[in-house]
Image (tube, helix red, strand yellow):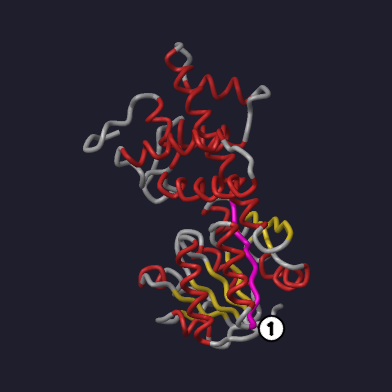
Amino acid sequence: METDGIGFIGLGVMGGPMCRNLAAKHGGELRAFDLSAPAREALRDSRATLVEEAAAAVEGADILFLSLPGAAQVEAVCRDLVGARRPGLLVVDLSTTTVSSARRTAALLEGAGMGFADAPVARTREAAIRGELSIMVGASAEVFARIHPLLAHIGSEVTHCGGVGTGQAVKLINNALVFEHTAALAEMMAIGERSGVAPAVLLEAVSRGSGDSFVLRNHGRKAMLPRDFPERAFPSQYVLKDIAGVLELAGDTGIPARMAETARDYYAEVVRRGQGSRYFPVVLELIAGRLDEPGGNA
């Protein structure tokens, strides 16, 4: 609701632009916090009220948004909220965690009279800046109806996936499909190049057939073809966190996830070779034999 007071914790690569859009488009007050002073300063020109500690971001808030690195950080913040006794507060977690963590956190908050929704986001930082993220929400119908107008400020597509935890399930599955497809594309690009097919020709030809895909047009053309794998994009070490989450979910459901296991092994090797901070399509360099052992350069 536009009259709700909003708190926002986590102003990183994705959280910063999401907070900026919420502050610009929400009619009420928004108080924002991040442990990093530079992350806070980056929003100094926004409508957000920047505060120096997490507790101050919660003051006066009816809804608290979180955009944090993972489950451990989300659960730590929520344990602090329970200790602070904020009945009636609704926590909306935009982070990518796990299904079990989302449900555990919801139960913890419910016991203290607070609500919870998992609402992980997909797409790029550029999409976050434009307010065009895809958001997958796990919440009751009542909670979803309440937060949908706010989520529409940061996402162009907001999907109610079901009860708590289903947002994380859909996000983890989405990410696993991207990581698996990127590794598969890397294999085929390496095979094609060694067969005498220029990578640009391969991608152009495949894009005109049934092998075309989002991964080919985006990760393939924009990163793998120019061999551009920057440090401040989604790194391979984050890939391992998300694949671990989907493998945990696979184990809980009793469904084997062999493709995800293969992708995990590829990205784990990238990390082992000291390249875990680089943009995850760098897996192409591993498969093509261009990624050195630890201590070398790609």
Please name the residue shown 54% across and 61% down the image: 95
The quarter in which the C terminus is drawn is top left
Image check: 188 left or right of 158? left
Q: Quadrant of residue 295?
A: top left
State the residue in front, 220 or 289: 289
State the residue in front, 141 or 146: 141
Count of numbered marks: 1
From this viewpoint, is residue 24 visible?
Answer: no
From the top left corner, tell me how far across and down residue 239 is, in percent.
Answer: 47, 46
State the residue in front, 114 or 107: 107
Q: Callout 1 environment at 10 Å: few (<14), some (14 to 19), or many (20+)?
A: few
From this viewpoint, is residue 278 visible?
Answer: yes
Q: What span is in magenta?
A: 113-122
Q: Main secondary structure of the magenta part?
A: strand
Q: Is residue 73 above or below residue 236?
A: below
The quarter in which the N terminus is drawn is bottom right
Is residue 121 one of those drawn in magenta? Answer: yes
From the top left corner, tell me how far across and down residue 285 is, in percent.
Answer: 38, 30
From the top left corner, tell me how far across and down residue 250 is, in percent.
Answer: 60, 45
Q: Residue furthest top?
A: 196
Q: Is residue 145 above or below residue 227?
A: below
Amino acid tagged 1: Thr
Please name the residue shown 53% across and 81% down the image: 82
Q: Is residue 295 above or below residue 87?
A: above
Is residue 171 one of those drawn in magenta? Answer: no
From the top left corner, tell me how far across and down residue 8 is, in percent.
Answer: 53, 74
Q: Is residue 155 above or below residue 56?
A: above
Q: Secondary structure at mark 1?
A: loop
Residue for badge 1 = 3
